[in-house]
Amino acid sequence: MITDISYYFSNYDKFPFEGFFDDMKYPWEALGKVFEFLDEILVKPDKKEMAGECLGKCDFYGNYYIGEGTRLYNGVTIIGPVYIGKNCELMPGCIVRPYTIIGDNCVLGHCSEVKHCVVFNCAKIQSTSFAGDSVIGKSARIGSGAIIANRKFDQSNIKVRADEGRLDTGMSFFGCILGDNSRIGANSVTQPGTHIGQYTWIYPATNVRGFIPSKKQVYQERPLTILDNETYELEP
């Protein structure tokens, strides 16, 4: 597995905070930094600022910043501390949970849930999907109904294989590293600690784990069975 952060992200200018990723060796370090960072800019000054607009009834808890041009539709829930950048769209019923940074020009789909994530500009997390404890690159896509699983059944720390041996990330909650411009198709699942390089496509209904290199197409071959069927008139 390649663990160098630069393998996954090369568009650091496409993130709201200059220098946020400076001196990071591993991509998952961003998930640790976000705690102290949001405490400093949102919690300590007790910031609760809406520069965008809420179109309907939205619920806000804790500290937050919502950037200019961002639109929150009916039923959106923000549980701070949360930072959301400019010109984003949060569709009806989506939930953003604590210690999440959403960049500019992002979309969170209907009834999606995002928890403790660091999201670069122009990323999209589509309807009814879940992304937890993940770093999502510039213009990356998570399709409808996709699940970024973020905890092992035995609740132990997530470990990754690297050239220097098996590394303990120190986190029992760790979802996915999704590189710039990569896509996870609808109804796919990534297992805890999955690393996906840049410009890679995970096709719909695919289950992946471990390390997926950059510039790949990934799918699981399944035989398709077609059988004759009787005719049934369905009642109203």
Image (cartoon, grey):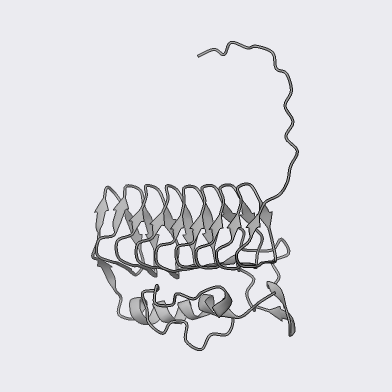
Q: Residue at x 56, y 47 (%)?
A: 186
Q: Nearer the viewer, residue 225 or 160?
A: 225
User: Does residue 28 appear in this view?
Assistant: no
- Quarter residue 69 falls in: bottom left
Q: In the image, is residue 48 above or below residue 111? A: below
- Location of residue 8 in the rendering, given as x and y in whole percent from the top left corner: 56, 73
| 215, 91: nearer the viewer | 215
Can you say which quadrant of the picture contains the N terminus? bottom right
Q: Residue furthest front?
A: 215
- Residue 100 location in percent, x, y? 44, 68
Q: Please indicate whether residue 184 sits to the left or right of residue 97 in the image.
A: right
Q: Is residue 33 above or below residue 196?
A: below
Residue pushed farthest bottom? Answer: 23
Rendering coords of residue 75 (x, y %)? 35, 48
Percent of width and height locating residue 199: 55, 63
- Residue in the image at 40% along x and 63% along y: 122
Q: How many marks can you see?
A: 0
- Image quadrant assignment for residue 226: top right
**Residue drawn at point x = 68 percent, y = 72 percent:** 158
Question: Is residue 198 visible to us here?
Answer: yes
Residue found at x 43% / y 77%: 12
155 on left or right of 51: right
